[in-house]
Image (tube, rainbow, N blue to C red):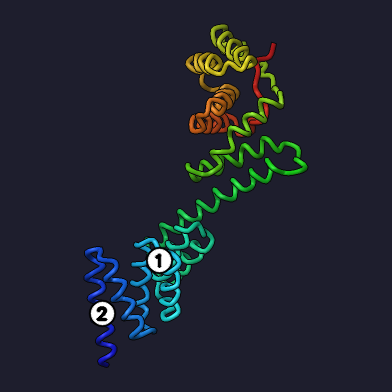
Amino acid sequence: MKDEQTTEELIEHGLAALEVAEFDEAIELFGQAAIEDSSNARAWFYLGLCYFETRQPDLAREALNRAVGAAPDYADAHYLLGTVAGATGELDLAAESYRRALAIDPHHHKAEEFLIRTEALLASREHYRSAVRLIHAEKRERDWLNRAARELLQSVAIFKDSPAQNEFARLAREVIASGNRVMIPDARASEGPFWSNAVERAEAAFARKNWPEAASNYKDALDLSSGHAFIHHALGLIYFELGDAESGVSAWQRAVDLDPDYDLSAIGQLGK
C-alpha cells in the first residue's frame, strides 16, 4: 500500500509540474512513478504526453505503448498514440489508434475529430499517389493526362496543402505540349461578337505563349460570360505557367464544376 501511495504522490506532483509546463521535472516524476509501479498506466500515459510535448516522439510512443499494455481500454492513451503517429506522418497507424479509442469510448470527441481529419488526409494522399503513378508510368494509358489532372484536383480539394500542388505545372506543360484542341462550335453565336473577339485575342496570345496578355483577354471574356468551362481551364493553364498554383487549381475546379465531363487534357478553342 505504501508503494502504491508513493506512486500516486509522484503522479500528483508530476501533474502539478505539467500544469505549469515544467516538463523536465514532470518527466522525472512520471518516470520515477513508472519505475515504482510499471503497471501504472497513468504514469506511462503522462510520461508519454510529456515526451510528446517536448518533441520526443519515439520516447512518447514507447511510454504510450506501455500505457495501453498496462490498460488496453485506456482510450486517451490510444488517442495520444494516434496523435504521435500523425505528427510523424504515419497516417495509417494514427487512424487505427483513433478507431481503437472510439471503440472504447464512442463519445471521445477528440479521437472522432482527428480520425475525420486523418481519413481525409489518407484520401488526399491516395488521389495524389494515383496521379503520380499516371504521370510517371512507363507505358501511359489512354486519357492518362485527363485522369491525372482530376486526381490532383481531388487531392487538393480534400487537403489544400497536398503535395499535389507541386505537380500541376508539370501537367499544364504536358497539356500545352500535346496540342490537343477541342472546338467549341456554338459559343460564338450564343455569346455575341464582343465575347468572341475577347476569346479570339486570348487564343492568339495563348498560341504565342504571351501568358499575361492571354489571361487579360480571357478575363475580359469572363466579365461578359463566366459560364464556359474551356475559358476557366485555359486560365488555369496560364496560372500554372505563371507559377500561381492556387489560382490555377481554382480555375480548373471551376471548369470541372461547370462541366463534370470536361477533358482537362484538351485546350478549348472557338470553332470557325
**In-image side of 144 versus 57 (left or right):** right
Specify the quadrant that holds the C terminus.
Answer: top right
Quarter of the image where one finds residue 204: top right
Where, quadrant-wise, is the N terminus in this rendering?
A: bottom left
* Residue 264 x, y percent position in the rendering: 64, 31
- Measure the alpha-carbon separation of dots 2 and 1: 22 Å
> On the image, numbered disc 1 is attached to which residue?
80
**Residue most toward the bottom?**
1
Relative placement, left or right, of 78 versus 133 is left
Does residue 7 appear to the left or right of 55 in the view shown?
left
The residue lying toward the viewer, choosing from 177 and 58, is 58
- Above or below, 238 relative to 7: above
From what the image shows, is residue 157 above or below residue 30? Answer: above
Lateral position of residue 105 relative to residue 216, left or right: left
In the rendered image, which quarter is residue 62 located in?
A: bottom left
Dot 2 crowding, Cα within 10 Å, few <14, some 14–19, many 20+: many
Q: Amino acid at mark 2?
A: Leu
Pointer 2 residue: 10
Say which residue appears at 41% left-offset and 73% top-offset: 63
**Category of crowding for the residue at label 1, using alpha-carbon neighbours closer than 10 angstroms: few (below 14), some (14–19), many (at least 20):** many
The residue mark sitting in front, 2 or 1, is 2
Question: Mark 2 or mark 1: which comes first in sequence?
Answer: 2
User: Which percent across, then down, holds residue 154?
Assistant: 56, 42
The image shows residue 120 at horizontal and vertical percentages of: 50, 51
State the image quarter where residue 261 is shown: top right
Task: State the SS at label 2.
Answer: helix
Q: Which residue is at a point 50% across and 61% down the rendered structure image?
A: 95
What residue sits 31% from the left and 81% below the top? 33
| Count of numbered marks | 2
